[in-house]
Amino acid sequence: MPQDATRASLGEVLRSGERSFSFELFPPKTDEGERQLWQTVRDLEALRPTFVSVTYGAGGSTRDRTVRITGDIAEHTTLTPVGHLTCVGASRQELRGVVAQYAAAGVSTILALRGDPPGGPMAPWQAHPDGLEHADELVSLVRSLGDFSVGVAAFPEGHPQSTDLDEDARVLAAKQDAGAEFAITQFLFRAADYQRLVERARFHGCTMPIIPGLMPVTNVAQIERFAALSGAAFPEDLAGRFAAVKDDDQAVRSLGVEIATDLARDLLDRGAPGLHFYTLNRSTSTREIYQALGLGEQR
């Protein structure tokens, strides 16, 4: 159902200074995966998060499912959904069409991303012949099409294709200038990396809320692969702790919850405006972290 016009936009909620707690989901490829997704949605709904986001697959490959699932969340739950949108393989007209689909489904917040090339984050970028080159252009396009709140990505250790961290901060400021109202970071393992990102961003005039992303480790090989793809460092001390329990799945998951909880506390102590959990469509670890932080009692 369309969002109540009198309700504050997500951008307004985040600017209010109230801490946000949010979750990222991805569109599954199978019926069983979709059943798991909806179980996770219901589990997370009980935590009353500020929002949930639904990502595209690699190269924008799940665009139609992303739009459908985000719209279903808007219609059938009490959650505030955020739909992803990327420039990958899409013309301006196609992007306008996706935004129109989101609007028709009652989705009023979009996370505007350039997106990774189909060959991966380090592959050469090639825009669609009638597409967009950069995320700030996508932000401008979305904002021109209606009263949307627009979020963007931020990279604590720098985007894989940035020449240096200062350039990365300038790009983030340019996204704000184009109309972005908040940013969500790639998942990280060190609170100091987040703090340095915020300091660089503020130096370059970027004042919007920057929400750190966390991914509780449940599978060591998987997290190492994700870290390599995103350009995030998997610190040696953490790798050593997980290596010691890698043959015990439950011990890995428990350690992942412990480390993510400690990181979350550190981030909040450093002034983070909230936390964004990359759930991989599983709610157990996230709910345990939420409980350990006492967040359910505060909301």
Image (cartoon, rainbow, N blue to C red):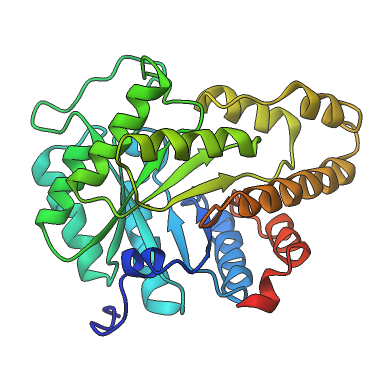
Q: Residue at 59% of width from left, 57% of height from top?
A: 32
Figure check: 35 above or below 25 = below
Looking at the image, which is closer to me, 251 or 272?
272
Give the quarter of the image for residue 240: top right
Give residue 53's position: percent from left, percent from top. 44, 57
Is residue 87 visible in the rendered image? The answer is no
Between 64 and 197, which is closer to the camera in this rendering?
197
The N terminus lies in quadrant: bottom left
244 up-or-down from 211: above or below:
above
Q: Residue at the location (61% across, 35% down)?
A: 192
Residue 165 relative to residue 254: left or right:
left
Q: Residue furthest front?
A: 203
Q: Nearer the viewer, residue 1 or 258?
A: 258
| Image coordinates for residue 101, horizontal then vertical, percent | 21, 61
Expressed as whole percent of the image width and height from the top left, the position of residue 51 reads 46, 65
- When the figure is inspected, residue 9 is found, relative to residue 148, above or below; the finding is below
Q: How many marks?
A: 0
Can you say which quadrant of the picture contains the C terminus?
Answer: bottom right
* Image coords of residue 103 (percent x, y): 21, 66
Residue in the foreground of this view, choosing between 259 and 55: 259
User: Residue at 54% of width from left, 69% of height from top?
Assistant: 49
Q: Is residue 199 left or right of residue 37?
A: left
